[in-house]
Amino acid sequence: MIRSKERDKELRTAQVSDLCRRRLLGYADSFSELAKSFDRQFEAVRKDRETVLTQRRLWEDRQVISGHLNEMAKIMTEAACEVLVFQPMESRRRKLLTQALAEEGIQVDGPCYVPRENGRRAIVLTMSTHRGSKVSVDEAADMISVLLDKRMQPSVTSPYVVEAEPQSFLLEEETGFVVLTGFSKAVKEDEAVSGDNYAVLETEKGRMTVMLSDGTGSGETAGRDSGSVLDLMEKMLEAGYGTDTAINMVNTALFAVGEDGNHPTLDICDIDLYEGNCQLRKVGGAVTFLKRGVEVEALATGNLPLGVFGQLEIQPICRKLQDGDYLVMVSDGVVDAFGEDSCEKDMASAISGIQDRNPGEIAERLLRMALCASGGRVRDDMTIGVIGIWKT
């Protein structure tokens, strides 16, 4: 561990050791050089159409491999050069914190501030209990909030319980918005398994990500394909990949496999819970609706599903959310149930008239409306996800 000190602000930094950094940078250089060996201009050796198409396909596969190797090199370089900035807690507050929690049976060591965006600060500290007792991290966070006169909440990566064994905890400032989600599904008639899947992720930095994927066709195979897409996306986002990078890597993986019948859609809603900013990314996904009171806005782009092209150019749809807004994400089976000519308009009208406030109840009501509009038939899998956002 290497540390330096700035006298002005008493900021300190921590980064990986020289040995680890050199090894990571060495690995990154190796991946970069390997990527260059795949990165060549396409040249057809023979002129007949079938051979040229085969050669072109092999060249495209090499470009996919080259892109993945370059991305790995980039991530390793970032990890090697990453610097954590922290600031020791003021001695008066540190003493107040340690003494007050000690009276509650909690031992605190090394409390520090970690700077965040827009002037926010997280707190990292080590906590343990005396005499083998256990205290929930939420209770400990409440005590710390009172002592510091600032609402703090445990990060999603922190342990749930403070125990006798010392553990590190990260407490973030309470977000400005809170989000609730609700989902409702209907499986295509004559099928036992839905081809749609969804996932909800919450990061430690106050971001909520909701994903919806519709597999090609319906049934078990479609469900497995869409589920695999979401599993890969979850793992990449949790590993620190950017959203656009993760989407492109999943896309190129499907493109390289080259299965004509495997082109799932991907709908991503990413919300900043501190500022209320929302970004929608659609890769073949159906329209999303933003409900603000009785006003409803349809949000859509014209992207094709995953795996159709080797590279994607994703233009996020950005909106500033307000207290009481709802986002309604749907698979195309829901939109199609409202008809062909004015389905989006009819669905927007249906959403506008809904008075329920609970996201789960809104999703259930909207599904019943879709079934009614289709005459009770479920001609395709239907999935509805509703995201409600409120100021804290």
Image (cartoon, rainbow, N blue to C red):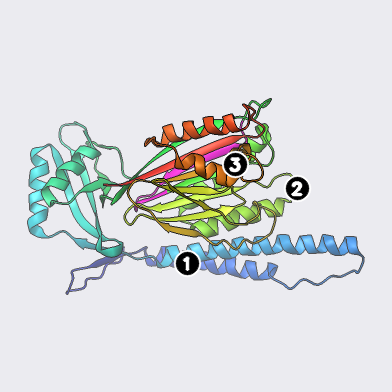
Find residue 279 and report its horizontal and vertical position in percent.
46, 56
Q: Which mark is residue 260?
A: 2
Front-lying residue, 333 or 79: 333
Q: CA distance from mark 2 to mark 1?
A: 36 Å
Front-lying residue, 132 or 194: 194
Q: Secondary structure at mark 3?
A: helix
Q: CA distance from mark 1 to mark 3?
A: 44 Å
Residue 60, image quadrant:
bottom right
Label 1 Cα crowd, 10 Å radius (few <14 / some 14-19 / many 20+): some
- Magenta residue span: 194-208
Q: Secondary structure at mark 1?
A: helix
Find residue 148 and report its horizontal and vertical position in percent.
13, 51
Q: Relative to 266, is 4 on the left or the right?
A: left
Is residue 125 positioned above or below 162 on the image? below
Q: Earlier in the sequence, mark 2 or mark 1?
A: 1
**Is label 1 or label 3 in front?**
3
Q: Main secondary structure of the magenta part?
A: strand
Q: Secondary structure at mark 2?
A: loop
Q: Residue at x 65, y 56 (%)?
A: 252
Find residue 151 and report its horizontal and vertical position in percent.
20, 49
Q: CA distance from mark 3 to mark 2?
A: 24 Å
Q: Residue at x 28, y 52 (%)?
A: 176
Amino acid type, mark 3: Val
Q: Relative to 6, is 333 on the left or the right?
A: right
Res 157 seen here: no
Give the residue at mark 3. Answer: 335
Give the residue at mark 1. Answer: 77
